[in-house]
Image (spheres, helix red, strand yellow):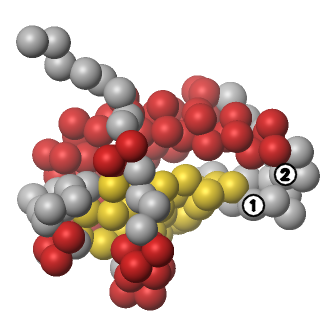
């Protein structure tokens, strides 16, 4: 059986309750061009780990630009999902809020995602 490397529907954060919990009780840090919000969800075990991406409509007026940034971010996350799963011992929620003011390419998003993985490893080792 082949292992799928997709970012499926079950891994996308869509629950209003879980999103509110993430932004109210979660922790955050900045890794330019993202602000990363995260929380470990022991009470959401059955749903597993989930992620979401947000891009400001105020900064990027055209939906095409917002969708491209979200697609690049999801792809960068998908390629590093195994590292995220190794760092967190329990199911987690993570939100990537894009705060850059201009369009970027995949290299910049990929480097930012590497920095986020490094930041998570230092944060979780301290706990």
For mark 1, give the secondary structure.
loop
Q: Nearer the viewer, residue 9 or 74?
A: 9
Q: Is residue 3 left or right of residue 99?
A: left
Residue 84, compared with residue 105, is above or below; it is: below
Q: Is residue 28 left or right of residue 93?
A: right
- Please tell me how crowded label 2 is: few (under 14), some (14-19), or many (20+) other residues with Cα within 10 Å: some
Location of residue 49 in the rendering, given as x and y in whole percent from the top left corner: 25, 55
For mark 2, give the secondary structure.
loop
**Outermost residue to the right:** 61
Location of residue 11 in the rendering, given as x and y in whole percent from the top left corner: 34, 47
- Please tell me how crowded label 1 is: few (under 14), some (14-19), or many (20+) other residues with Cα within 10 Å: few
Q: Is residue 114 left or right of residue 54?
A: left
| Residue at screen point 59% across, 35% down | 71
**Outermost residue to the top:** 1
Residue denoted by label 2: 60
Question: Residue 19 sits in which quadrant?
Answer: bottom left
| Residue at screen point 19% across, 47% down | 85
Residue 124, compared with residue 108, is above or below; it is: below
Split into 4 quadrants, where in the image is the N terminus? Answer: top left
Q: Nearer the viewer, residue 5 or 77?
A: 5
Residue denoted by label 1: 56
Location of residue 81 in the rendering, given as x and y in whole percent from the top left corner: 29, 39
Location of residue 62 in the rendering, given as x and y in whole percent from the top left corner: 88, 45
Q: Is residue 103 left or right of residue 9?
A: right
Looking at the rendered structure, which numbered label has been put on residue 17?
none
The answer to whether residue 88 is seen in the rendering is yes
Residue 114, compared with residue 30, is above or below; it is: above
Q: Are marks 1 and 2 in contact (CB under 8 Å)?
A: yes
């Amino acid at each position: 059986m082949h292992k799928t490397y997709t970012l499926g529907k079950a891994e996308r954060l869509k629950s209003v309750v879980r999103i509110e919990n993430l932004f109210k009780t979660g922790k955050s840090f900045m890794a330019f061009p993202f602000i990363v919000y995260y929380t470990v969800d022991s009470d959401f075990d059955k749903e597993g780990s989930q992620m979401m991406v947000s891009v400001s409509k105020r900064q990027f007026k055209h939906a095409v630009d917002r969708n491209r940034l979200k697609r690049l971010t999801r792809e960068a996350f998908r390629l590093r999902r195994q590292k995220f799963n190794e760092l967190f011992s329990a199911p987690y929620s993570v939100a990537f809020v894009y705060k850059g003011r201009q369009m970027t390419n995949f290299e910049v998003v990929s480097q930012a995602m590497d920095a986020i993985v490094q930041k998570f490893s230092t944060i979780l080792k301290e706990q």
